[in-house]
Amino acid sequence: MAGGAVVVRVGPVPESFASGLAEGLGARLVEGFVKVFPDGEVYVRLPGEVEGSTAVIVFTGYPEPTQRLWEAVLAVEAARGLGAEHVVVVAAYTPYARQDRRFLRGEPVSVRALFYSLAASGAEAFVTVDIHKTVSLQWFPGPAVNVDPAPAFAEKLRPLLEGREKVYVIAPDQGAVGRAKSLAERLGAPFDYLEKVRDRVTGEIVLRPKLVDVSGAAVVLIDDIVSTGGTMAKAARMLYEQGAEVVIAAATHGLFAGEALEKMRKAGIVHILVADTVKAPEDVDVASVGRLAADAVKSVLEAVAGYESEG
Ligand code: R5P
């Protein structure tokens, strides 16, 4: 590969993620310059190192997802303009991924529009961490890889769970059960998901694990996103009502909109773990996934460029 790989950070990607990515690739980390004009238009300028390189443009979709996305699109186009040999996009957190189908007539498939915009501007390959549904990657017109944060989460959780006899990894709904399975396998624990059932006594709809009995257990709740914290808080409350001893929350993308953290703590969640895909609040535990993203980038580069690491 003529010019080697250069990781270009565009926007507020956490330092640990960007440097983990660059180190894992044995690549230089450079900054894309971004500013917003008084009328709201976004300006991006990339450094000269991108010329002739394999440009790995890294961005994250939070905060201000729409601006972040547009910065990434402009950075891809700028990399092409500088004569980058290959352009790969890494989205630490992919915004708009929950709108992955037309729930109502007249709606867009937003995540598909996002992929088309990046690809049309010159992105050849795409890597992201824990996208809402991996099936969405089919719409990126080139190699696209999802990074599972479970190895990094397991490393953080093992010491916390040491000595506990009964540990379950539970997803808040069936759609997230794949995440629970992957983490549970690494922790050597059973997994399950919560389903809505009508309580025979009160007649109320409650959330209950499909298979396991959580009484006396340490439960790790796992999800892709914490936004308002409502999903995690409700799940934790239900699990405590059903006898769980301790509930820990692990979510890849900690957006923590509004009072999310307070809501989760009030529900009794004793430990909150996120990945470094978006900036985390000070008092939250953070697992670094940049190195895992680097491995995924290597695999897509093999497809587009016959990549060999220089690190
Ligand atoms: C939904 O489909 C996602 O997987 C998350 O469960 C959801 O985004 C969490 O949102 P909130 O924190 O607002 O409940």
Image: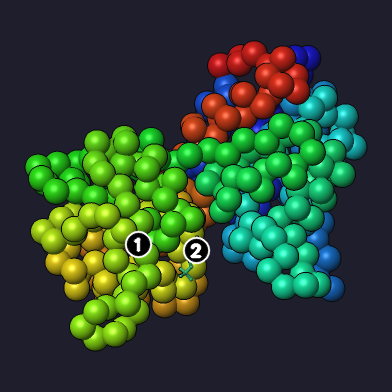
Q: Is residue 142 above or below residue 173?
A: above
Which residue is located at x 45 percent, y 63 percent?
Answer: 226
- Residue 286, image x and y in percent? 38, 49
- Residue 120, image x and y in percent? 87, 44
Which is more toward the observer, 283 or 90?
Answer: 90
- Residue 9, image x and y in percent? 65, 43
The mark total stands at 2
As drawn, which residue projects farthest toward the front?
Answer: 200
Q: Distance between the residues labelled 2 and 1?
A: 22 Å
Say which mark, if any, is on residue 303: none
Q: Is residue 14 above or below residue 143?
A: below
**Crowd class of label 2 (few under 14; some 14 to 19; many from 20; radius 10 Å):** many
Element under disc 2: loop
Horizontal side of 203 relative to 146 (left or right) equals: left
Label 2 lies in ligand 1 vicinity (Cβ under 8 Å): yes
Q: Quadrant of residue 89?
A: top right
Question: Mark 2 sits on what residue?
Answer: 255
